[in-house]
Amino acid sequence: MRTSLTILGLESSCDDTAAAVLRLDGETPTILSSIVHGQNDLHAAYGGIVPEIAARAHAEKLDICVKAALTKAETTLSQIDAVAVTAGPGLIGGVLSGVMCAKGIAAGASLPLIGVNHLAGHALTPRLTDGIAYPYLMLLVSGGHCQFLIVRGCGDFSRLGGTIDDAPGEAFDKTARLLGLAQPGGPSVEREALQGDPERFRFPRPLLDRPGCDMSFSGLKTALLRARDVLMDAQGGLTRQDRADLCAGFQAAVADVLAEKTRRALAIYLGEAPATSAFAVAGGVAANGAIRAALEAAADAAQTAFVAPPLALCTDNAAMIAYAGAELLRAGHRDDMTLAARPRWPLDRSGPALLGSGKKGAKA
Ligand code: KG4
Ligand code: ZN
């Protein structure tokens, strides 16, 4: 086994085009560069991500990102040991752009190619940032993902449950839209909620009455829509306080659901008696102060370390793909030119497929 690996990573499964160079010396990873080109401006007028526009932008930006990542890392392709690329799940046009670009680089520079599951990239990030040991419990919670995983190895995941409809970030974004707040909705709703009373509107806590770790968030926005319309009919509009209270009530409901399901997932994970226990979160929604505090409290109560990687590595990036690629390469994994781009790709092949498809593509 080589003790030092330098990996070029590519990510293009949603609305961020990203490239990164990462070095793994023994067990110590170093991000030499991480370039992320967002596409918010391109999609802003449409109220959501337009897959065709996203795919075209990825195709245009990927080589620019790769060049920038190599330059920033003061590296050339001759010093790279392998190319890792997100091969799914995600919006297929974007995934295809990344896989084709990675194949071109791998073939041109005679480098090994490694297809990485985007969710594995997120799920392995706590090892990249905090070096935590397997097995750990992970909650991926973003605009496109929401699931609990026990992470046992770079290719060994058990899914304990997840959303059966919207991801929480999607629900925050829809709530913001219903209340005329700016996108992305999470930060706007959180800002409003700071001035609000979370008790004034008692929104439902879906699926808490059922056992297990599955979650549902689509009914919440319908409840919020109804509460908003009642106020609008009665008053002809919303006051600032109404809007803040609606945001606070919504956020409290999401936090309660995530915290209770976290307690259940922790009980299952701790039942396996890990030598050291850790609960890690990733995804944009983990940036929410109230939600983060609720998750941290659940971990504290279970005497489990709480790990929240820095936001830039919680959201979509290519450093996590390069890191996952490095672990996979070390484990003897390699792909070849037949590597396929996959719109759906569940991490836990034994788990049941998830229903539905979020605004950011299929939920794997
Ligand atoms: O992980 P991410 O950048 O992208 C993917 O979905 O993959 O997550 C973006 C999502 C958006 O839906 C955004 O509204 C939500 O994360 N988000 C937040 C906050 N910051 C971002 N949700 C709640 N509170 C926040 N502070
Ligand atoms: Zn993601």
Image (tube, helix red, strand yellow):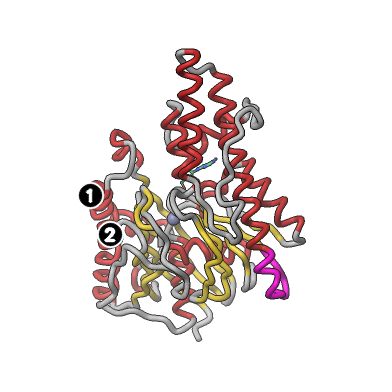
Foreground of the two, 32 or 154: 154
Q: CA distance from mark 2 to mark 1?
A: 10 Å
In the picture of the structure, the residue carrying the numbered disc 1 is: 52
Relative placement, left or right, of 359 versus 32 is: left
Report helix, strand or loop for mark 2. Answer: helix
Relative placement, left or right, of 143 versus 68 is: right
Residue 222, position as x, y percentages in the image: 46, 36
Foreground of the two, 22 or 222: 222
Say which amino acid is labelled 1: Glu
Check mark 2 vs ligand 2: CB closer than 8 Å? yes or no: no
Q: Quadrant of the C terminus?
A: bottom left
Residue 102, position as x, y percentages in the image: 30, 67
In the picture of the structure, the residue carrying the numbered disc 2 is: 92
Any mark on residue 144, and which?
Answer: none
Q: Which residues are magenta?
A: 267-278
Residue 288: tell me if it is visible. Answer: yes
Q: Residue at x 62, y 26 (%)?
A: 196
Foreground of the two, 109 or 261: 261
The question of residue 59 being in magenta is answered with no
Residue that lies at the very extreme toward the front in this rendered image = 209
Residue 341, position as x, y percentages in the image: 29, 67
Specify few, some or many for label 2: CA neighbours under 10 Å numbering under 14, 14-19, or 20 or more: many
Foreground of the two, 108 or 51: 51
